Image: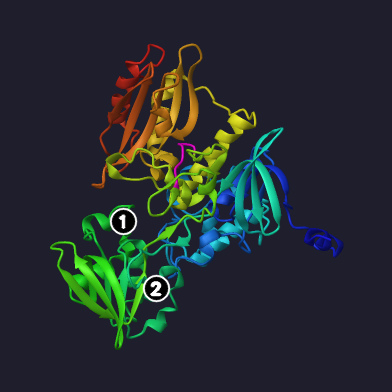
Amino acid sequence: MTSDARAASDGAPARPFPPGEYPVVVVGSGPGALQVSYELSRFGIEHAVISADAGPGGMFRKWPFFQRLLSWTKPYAPAERTSRAFERWDWNSLLAREPELRGLQLEFMDGTSDFPSRPDMERNLTAFAERAGIKVRYGCRWQATRREETAAGDRFVLETTEGEYRCRFAIFAVGVAEPYSPTVPGIELAVHYADTRAAETYAGKRLFIIGKQNSGFELASGLLQWASRISLSSPSPAKTSIETHTLVGVRARYVQPFEDAALGGGVDILAASLKGISKVPGGLRVDLERSDNAMPMSLEADEVISATGFTCPLLDLPSIGVATFGQSKLPAQTEYWESATVPGIYFAGTITQGSSGLKKHGIPSNSGAVHGHRYNGRLLVAHLAETAFDAVIERPAIAAGDLRDHLLAEATHAPELWHQKAYLASVVSLDGATGPRNEGIQPLSRFLDGEGPDAVAMTLEADGSGAIFPVLYVRRGNQTEEHPLEPDPLHDHEGPTYRRAVGQILERLSPSVPAA
C-alpha cells in the first residue's frame, strides 16, 4: 500500500500529486514556484508541484541569517493595498488577481521596520499558498532527469524520492541555493555563509570574511558587536558611491562596516585576492595578494567565513543539454525564461536572472529578488498558456486619443516598469485596421528583436547616477527607434512636458494616433 493510500485509509487527507504524468511539473515551493503555480491554476492548466521542503517559503525558511530582509513593504504608501499601483511599494507580496490575496505582507509586519523579518516573509508566503489554494507535494525530492520519446511526443521524466513524474513541460524554481566557495588552498578551513553559527559564538573572535557583496556585509554588520576584529576582502575595491546606492551592490542598510573601516573601528575592507588559508598556532593565517600592487600580505584570524555566494542546484540538467554560464551556473535562457538549449524546460524564481536582458547602462534586472521575478513568473505562464495550451489572452483596444495618456500613466504607476527597469516594457500594438491594442507587459528584449507589427513600448530606465527616466520605443516596419525622456525629480511623468514630448512622437507615427 502506498503512503497516499495509507493516509486515505487512516482518514488523513491524501498528499497531492502522486507520481505519474502531468502536462506541467513545477519543482520548488519558494516564492517563484508559488507564483507560477498560482498563475497555472488561474489559466486552468493541470500541473503538479513537488518540493523537498517541509512547507512553503524556499530559502526564506532559513535565510537571511540575521533575519531582516533587504526588500521593503511600505504600509502607508500612496496607493491602495489591493491596487496594482501598490506593488511598486510592496517588494515582498506575490501577485494575485483576487483583491484579498494582494499585499499580504502587510498583515505580518509589526511596524518596527518597513523591511520585514525573515519569519514575517515566511508567514506571508505560507498565507498566500493556503489562501490561494496552492497544493504542493512536500517532502518529495527531485533527484534526476531524463528525456524520453513517446508516441505523444517527447517527455521529461523527473526521478524523485517517491517515484517518477512525466511531463511535457518542466519548470524548475529551485533557487540559487547551493553554497559556493572558491577553490584555493585551505578553503576547507573556512565555513560558508550557509553554516554561520549564532552571533554570540563569535564573541571576541578575529574574523576574516571572503567576499564584499550583500552576504559579506550582512555578516559584518550583524557581528560588529561580537567580533574583536573583522576583515573583508575581494579583488575589487569597494566603491561606496556605487555599492551603497544601487541595487546591484551592497544595500544602504549595510554601511556601518564602511564607517567603522573609515574611522579605524576594527573593520578592514581589503581589495585583495585570496591565495590560501593555513593553520598556525592560535588560529588561521590568511594569505592575500593586494589588487593595487600585487604585493603579498597576510593576516591572522580565529575563523574564516566564505560569503562567496551560491550556485544553482540543477543536478543533472546539464547532462541532458541545459547550458549554464558563470560562477553561479545559471542556465542560459530565452527572454521567456525557457532553456536556450532544451525547449520545454523553463525556470522560475531567482534563477530567471539567467535571462539577463539588455543590461542597459550596465545595470542588470531585479530577477534575483521577489519583486522582480514575480512578474517573470506571471509572463512565463501567460506565454506558455498561449503558445502550448491554446489560451486566449485578452488584448483590449485603446482609443487612439487615449494612447498618449495610457503610456504616460504606465511610466508613472506601472510596478512592472519600476521593478524591472529596461527589462520589462508596457507594449501597445498599432494595427492600421483595428487601432491601438494593449499588449500588456512584455520583455523589452522581445519587443526589440525587430519582428512584429508596428507598436510602441514604454519603459523606465536608470543610468546608475540616481536618475530614473521614461524611454519610449517605437517599432515601425521591423525597425526600432529609442526616445529617452527627461527624468522628473518627483517621478511624475504625466505632466504637460511629457504630454507634449510623447504627443509629438506619436503624431509622427500615423494620423490615426493623434497627439491630443
Q: Position of residue 206 (x, y in %)?
A: 30, 81
Task: Assess whether residue 286 is covered by the magenta stretch.
Answer: no
Q: Nearer the viewer, residue 234 or 487?
A: 234
Residue 79 visible? The answer is: no
Task: Specify the segment rendered in magenta.
Answer: 331-336
Q: Look at mark 2 in the image and give the residue it sits on.
A: 188
Q: Look at mark 1 in the image and give the residue it sits on.
A: 249
Q: Nearer the viewer, residue 249 or 147?
A: 147
Q: Residue at x 45, y 19 (%)?
A: 453
Quadrant location, the C terminus: top left
Residue 259 occupies which quadrant of the picture? bottom left
Q: Position of residue 400 (x, y in %)?
A: 44, 18
Q: Position of residue 464 (x, y in %)?
A: 26, 46
Q: Residue at x 42, y 57 (%)?
A: 71
User: As displayed, is residue 342 above or below residue 480?
Assistant: below
Q: Amino acid at mark 1?
A: Gly
Q: Which mark is residue 163?
A: none
